[in-house]
Each structure stands twice: as C-alpha cells, then as structure tokens.
Image: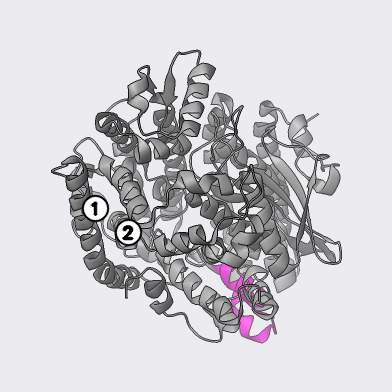
C-alpha cells in the first residue's frame, strides 16, 4: 500500500514519514497529477456558466493531493536527500513542469477564468476574493495562455529545460560542497581556533575514520575557520575552495548551466511579451520594475559606499599594523574583522556563545511569540519525523486551540543543504467551515552538541534562528480562506518583513533577559555585553550593505538585460561588481556558479528584496520601539494586518493599515549608522 496516495490517518493529519518509502514517491506524484487533472476537467466540463465559485474557487482548491506529496518530497530533497531522492527529483520535475503548463495553457479553463475576470466589477467580491481572481487570471496570462499554439509549445519546452537545469545546478553545488575536505594533522595548524570548533572537527574526522581534524565547506565548519584560524595559507585554501564551487571546469561545473538558465529565462520573458526576465518577475512585486529596483539599489549604494570605503581602509590599516599584511584579501576579511571587533568592543563570539545555548534561544523565540501573540509551544513525541534530530511541537493559542504543528531541524548532516530556511508541509486554508491548520518547519545548520558541550550559538546564529522563526510565525498565524494566498504566499519583496523584523528582539535587553542565560551558571547575560552587542550591531555595516547590494546588482545584471551576449561568466561578474568591489579579485572564484538563491531558489530578479524588506522592518520595528517592544496593541495590529493576512491584499495596503503610513528608509539608515 502506498501511504502517500491515501488519506493520512495520523494525528493532526501530519506526514507519516516512517511509513513512506522512496519508491512511493513517483507513483504518488503520478496519481496526484492524474487526480488534479480530473479536478480541472470537472471545472472545464461544467455545463453551468462560469462563476467565481465553480471556476476560481474550485481551481484554488484543486490539486490538494499533489501539493501535499510535493511539499513532503521537496522538503526531504532539501533537508534529507540521497542519491535515490535526487534521481526521483530529476524524473518528477519535468512531469510537474509539464502539468503546470497543461493547466496554464488549457484554453477551456482560461476561457472560464477570463469570463469571470471580465465581470469582476459586478461580482461584489471581498478583498481576498478579488485578489484570488486577479492572481488566477494573471497566472494564465503571465504564463502564455494568450499565446498561439506554436508559441505555447515553445514555452513548454523552455519550462521543462529550466526545471531540469535548476535541479542540476543545485545538485552540483551540493556535490562540490561535500567533495572538499581540509584535513589537518598538525596541531599547530589549529592555532587560533576555539576548542568547540576543534572538537567538532575531530568528531568529523572520526566519523570519516581519519586521524586529526577535518574542516568542510558546511557553514558551521567553514565560518569559524575563516574567522579564527591564524594560518593564513589554510584560510586561503579553504576560501578558494568555497568560492570556486561550480567553477572548476570539472563534471560539476555550473558555468554553462548559469548561462543557459539566464538565456532561457530571457527567451521565456520575450515570448510572453516582456522586455526581460526582470520585467516579467517585478510586475508582481512591490518594486514593480527593474528601473525602480536599480534606483533603489543605487541610492543605497551612494549612502553605503563612503562608509564601506572608510571601514575597509580601517580594516586594512589594522591588519597591516597587527601582522604586516600589505594587501587585505578576501580570506583575511572575517579574521581581521573579528580581531578588530574584539579590540573596539572587546566582544567576541566565544565570550557570548555560553549565553546562547540552542535550547534556550529557541525557548526565547517561543517566549517572545507568547508575549506578542499569546502562543504556547509544547514539545510532542507522538508524530512522525523525517530524521531523529528533528523536534516537533504543538502550537496553541490563549484558548488552547491548535494553531500549528511546528518542526525544528537544526544540525548539519550529509544530505542536507547548507544555510537556513523555513518551509511548510501543509498550508492553512478554510474549507467546509473547517480551518485547516498549517504544518510549518524551520531548517538550520548549527554546530551539533559534542560529548562535552551543548550546541552553543554565535550571535549571528541567534539572529538566524529568530529570522527563520519570524517566517514560521507568518506561516503559523495564517488565517485565510484560500491555500494559495495563505502564510508566506505574498509578494517576494514583502516575504522577508516578518522574518527580518523578528531579528530586532535579539538586540533588546528586555528580550535577551528572557533567554540569554549562561549554560553552566544560569547567569543572565551581563548588561555590558548587551550594550556591546548593540554598539557593534552597526560595525562594518557599510561593508555588509555593499556586499548585499553587490548580490542584488549581480542578480539584476543577469536578469534585467538580454544575456545572450555573455560568453565569459567571470568577465561578466567582474563588470557587475565594479561599483561594489573592495577586495582584490580572486581569479579562481566566481559567485554565480553557486548563487543558489537566484539559480535554484526563487530569488531571480528578487535578491534586492532583502534590502527592500530591511527598509520595511526597520520602519515597522521603530513603531514597536515607540510604543514598547511588547506592546499588545502594536503586536495585535502586526498580527492582524501582516502575519494573518498572507497575500490576500496588496502588501502596501496591508503595511499602511498596520503602520498608518508608507515606509521610509530613514529608520534603516539610522539603525545601520549610515546617516
């Protein structure tokens, strides 16, 4: 029996991971697609005239079985993959892409949608229904429904090819990440590294049946090495390996894949009547157009560049005075920044980490959510997990009603991609008067506990946890009728607001007092450390802003023009980075070949949105600060207008309803010390 093709009989309808075998996926996808096609056929063959209910609403709730299987499978593909799952992904992706096109290019279906859309002014729809109708119509028109047959076929081929290329891109990056190991056997080469980092490297070596210490390109191993290792040559070796992923002219090379993806996206946009891929994407964003994004990035660049140059000069002088470094290289950045930060603020992660035991930080996020939104989190052990490291919770409101199921997956392992993300196994929606609650997950890569130490987080990891938890709250508190407008289903440059605003609580003494307790003594983090955390928050903010802007500009470079003239990926990047470059170039390295956000994730033409959302989050948090960071009234407005509303209305409408006015960048520039 294939558990994925029957209705789950689990507690809260959770995914029955322990009963799922890899071989169940392909048939489940095939059945899910067949069932979704039948639902579409029922809509198109309905003899009654098209109405909002029998067409738009019916379409919104179709494909439920397929969505469930997809959510489970692709979440495992990111967090718990293996060769078999990767092979299935290669088989399934073209099927899904073809099915998507079958729906979007279905003329009968589009005719019905169009018929409802053309009478929308007479239908007396509420705001959510109006948005749904608008989105459904655009999902056809923006994907070729108005094209002649031959062009539709062309579009299908492009989409099939793109879905394969993006998978291949991601698999190459993962394979390159795992292919490299820095194997150290001389104790002197560990100079400067904290003992917890050394212990973790010894455990990695032991698990691979090797002597000594092994450092990898996984963030919890890579970042501490680059920050603390005194051996400059080894830092260089690791940095070059990290920066050359997908750029080594081997069988895992991504250069041609990147060029193909960029060209196909451009061709697709042209086919649909748009000037470039960025014009196509930005039509459905708060930013609206490439011109507006470029103006936004360039205005921030003008503010950040002078500060970044001052900071870089200060850092270069510091490295020269300290160690006689004539030219500051990329592999020196994190190392000397950390030393300078210690000198200026006498604050280093190793001093702070004992106050940030993972379990306490997570509990802190729960407490903040409780104070703001009245949520409680209770760990449960009677639902399935996909890996033993995952911890599961029931989330309840003040009256004890179930709000969400929450999965937390914190440690790196083989088969899990780098980075941190939030995702969901099941969306929230309301059907037949029943409010189906969401199943939300956050996935991170923090240092595993060792035999002698619990998992202790750097302050950067603390903000990462709060960031992903902010996304999770957006998913958990969703309260919309339609699944495709629920939770994080919002404009891409709005989706980072809930995550980024939540990071702000990590800097507030009132919030830190709730969870930053020394893991051995229970002592609350000293006020002087909090003061230093706040003071150092804008340390090298000019350089950090420049780095973010460089990624945004590279993204726009690939997508806001015709890329067909680009033949040399490295030369093209050099040109894009000209206005943001501080460090000398590293010939062996390229950014694009492992820039998963834009070539595998959904951030193409959207990387600017991190900065865009920072403008929103600084402006929104200023409101909390004015009224009190746990002010019930402001929290209620944020929950009701932002977190629960999903994508039911235009984000600027929702934001103004919460804040009373449009956001201005002043709060961000002030916070970053760039004014």
Q: Residue 325 vs residue 423: left or right?
A: left
- Whether 663 is drawn above or below 216: the answer is below
Residue 622 percent coordinates (x, y)? 51, 77
Residue 7 percent coordinates (x, y)? 82, 43
Residue at x 76%, y 48% (from the top left corner): 393
Residue farthest along the left direction in this orientation: 326
User: For the C terminus, which image quadrant?
Assistant: bottom left
Q: Residues within 10 Å of mark 1 (few under 14, many from 20)?
A: many
Q: Earlier in the sequence, mark 1 or mark 2?
A: 1
Residue 540, label in figure: 2
Task: Indicate the secondary structure of the residue bearing disc 1.
Answer: helix
How many numbered dots are placed on residues in this image? 2
Q: Is residue 567 visible?
A: no
Task: Indicate the secondary structure of the residue bearing disc 2.
Answer: loop
Q: Residue 176 vs residue 30: left or right?
A: left
Residue at x 51%, y 49% (from the top left corner): 352
Could you give the CA–CA distance between mark 1 and mark 2, rounded to whole angstroms? 9 Å
Query: Do the residues under discs 1 and 2 have CB atoms within 8 angstroms?
Result: yes
Residue 555 percent coordinates (x, y)? 33, 55
Q: Residue 320 vs residue 300: left or right?
A: left
Residue at x 63%, y 62% (from the top left corner): 474
Q: In the image, is residue 460 part of the stretch drawn in magenta? A: no
User: For the N terminus, which image quadrant?
Assistant: top right
Q: Which residue is mark 1?
A: 315
- Whether 79 is drawn above or below 333: the answer is above
Residue at x 56%, y 42% (from the top left corner): 456
The span shown in magenta is 115-137
- Whether 674 is drawn above or below 266: the answer is below
Between 124 and 656, which is closer to the camera in this rendering? 656
């Amino acid at each position: 029996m294939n558990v994925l093709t029957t209705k789950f009989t689990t507690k809260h309808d959770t995914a029955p991971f322990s009963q799922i075998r890899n071989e169940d996926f392909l048939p489940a996808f095939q059945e899910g697609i067949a069932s979704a096609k039948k639902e579409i056929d029922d809509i198109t063959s309905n003899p009654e005239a098209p109405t909002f209910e029998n067409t738009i609403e019916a379409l919104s709730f179709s494909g439920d079985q397929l969505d469930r299987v997809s959510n489970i499978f692709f979440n495992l593909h990111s967090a718990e993959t293996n060769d078999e799952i990767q092979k299935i992904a290669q088989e399934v992706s073209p099927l899904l892409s073809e099915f998507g096109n079958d729906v979007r290019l279905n003329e009968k279906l589009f005719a019905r949608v169009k018929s409802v859309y053309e009478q929308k002014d007479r239908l007396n729809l509420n705001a959510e229904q109006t948005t749904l109708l608008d989105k459904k119509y655009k999902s056809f028109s923006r994907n070729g429904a108005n094209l002649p047959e031959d062009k539709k076929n062309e579009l299908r081929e492009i989409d099939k090819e793109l879905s394969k290329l993006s998978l291949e891109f991601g698999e190459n990056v993962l394979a390159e990440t795992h292919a490299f190991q820095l194997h150290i056997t001389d104790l002197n080469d560990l100079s400067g590294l904290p003992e917890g980092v050394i212990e973790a490297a010894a455990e990695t070596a032991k698990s691979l049946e090797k002597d000594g210490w092994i450092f990898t390109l996984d963030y919890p191993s890579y970042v501490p090495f680059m920050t603390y290792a005194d051996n400059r040559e080894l830092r260089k070796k690791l940095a070059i390996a990290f920066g050359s992923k997908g750029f080594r002219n081997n069988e895992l090379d991504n250069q041609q894949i990147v060029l193909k993806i960029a060209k196909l996206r451009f061709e697709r946009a042209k086919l649909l009547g748009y000037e470039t891929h960025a014009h196509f994407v930005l039509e459905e964003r708060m930013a609206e157009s490439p011109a507006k994004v470029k103006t936004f990035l360039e205005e921030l660049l003008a503010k950040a560049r002078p500060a970044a140059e001052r900071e870089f000069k200060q850092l270069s002088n510091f490295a020269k005075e300290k160690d006689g470094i004539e030219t500051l290289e990329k592999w020196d950045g994190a190392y000397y920044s950390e030393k300078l930060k210690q000198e200026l603020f006498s604050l280093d992660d190793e001093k702070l980490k004992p106050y940030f035991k993972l379990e306490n930080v997570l509990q802190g996020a729960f407490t903040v959510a409780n104070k703001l939104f009245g949520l409680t989190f209770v760990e449960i052990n009677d639902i399935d997990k996909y890996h033993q490291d995952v911890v599961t919770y029931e989330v309840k409101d003040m009256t004890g009603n179930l709000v969400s199921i929450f999965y937390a997956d914190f440690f790196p392992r083989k088969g899990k991609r780098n980075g941190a993300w939030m995702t969901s196994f099941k969306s929230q929606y309301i059907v037949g008067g029943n409010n189906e609650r969401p199943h939300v997950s956050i996935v991170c890569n923090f240092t595993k506990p060792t035999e002698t130490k619990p998992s202790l987080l750097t302050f950067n990891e603390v903000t990462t946890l709060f960031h992903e938890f902010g996304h999770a709250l957006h998913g958990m508190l969703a309260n919309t009728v339609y699944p495709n407008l629920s939770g994080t289903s919002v404009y891409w440059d709005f989706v980072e607001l809930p995550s980024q605003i939540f990071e702000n609580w990590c800097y507030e003494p009132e919030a830190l007092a709730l969870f930053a307790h020394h893991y051995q003594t229970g002592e609350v983090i000293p006020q002087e450390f909090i003061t230093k955390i706040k003071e150092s928050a804008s340390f090298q903010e000019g350089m950090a802003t420049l780095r973010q802007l460089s990624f945004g500009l590279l993204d726009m470079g690939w997508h806001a023009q015709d890329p067909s003239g680009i033949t040399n990926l490295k030369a093209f990047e050099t040109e894009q980075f000209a206005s943001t470059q501080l460090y000398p170039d590293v010939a062996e390295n390229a950014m694009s070949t492992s820039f998963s956000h834009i070539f595998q994730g959904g951030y193409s033409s959207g990387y600017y949105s991190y900065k865009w959302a920072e403008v929103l989050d600084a402006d929104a948090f200023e409101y909390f600060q004015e009224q009190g960071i746990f002010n019930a009234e402001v929290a209620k407005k944020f929950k009701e207008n932002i977190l629960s509303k999903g994508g039911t209305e235009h984000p600027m409408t929702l934001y103004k309803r919460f804040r009373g006015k449009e956001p201005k960048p002043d709060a961000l520039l002030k916070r970053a010390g760039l004014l």
